[in-house]
Amino acid sequence: MPQRKATAKSLRQTAKRTVRNKVRKTRVKTTVRMAREAAREPEESLQQAIRQAYSAIDKAAKKHIMHRRTAARKKSRLMRAVNAAKSS
């Protein structure tokens, strides 16, 4: 148990932020997975899935859940995977 009030408050804040960040990270992973799966389906669902994945990645980077270069790398790898799936 913390000895100071400020330390206790810090622990409470960290717990809240951890939950919030976990939700955002999970949303990124889910939308990216859905976009990769949509690459094997018709074009309309693919465009929407890519848009949602890009949005989730950009929001996570904006909120500093992930580094902006990590976000750029994820978007790049997603598009490479989608293009490879479309060409095959």
Image (tube, rainbow, N blue to C red):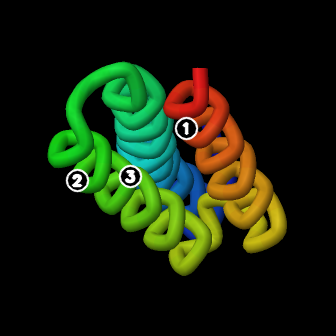
Label 2 – label 3 distance at C-alpha: 5 Å
Q: Earlier in the sequence, mark 2 or mark 1?
A: 2
The image position of residue 29, as x and y in percent, is 49, 33
Marks 2 & 3, CB-CB < 8 Å contact: yes
Residue closest to the far bottom: 62
Which residue bears the numbered disc 2? 48
Q: Is residue 25 visible?
A: yes
Q: Foreground residue, 50 or 88?
A: 88
Pick the residue in front: 2 or 30.
30
The earlier-in-sequence mark between 1 and 3 is 3
Task: Please tell me whether mark 1 sits on a helix, a strand or a loop.
Answer: helix
Q: Is residue 70 above or below residue 55?
A: above
The residue type indicated by label 2 comes to Gln
- Disc 1: CA contacts within 10 A as few (<14), some (14-19) or many (>=20): some
Q: Is residue 4 visible?
A: no
Using the image as rendered, state which of residue 22 and residue 14 is in the foreground: 22
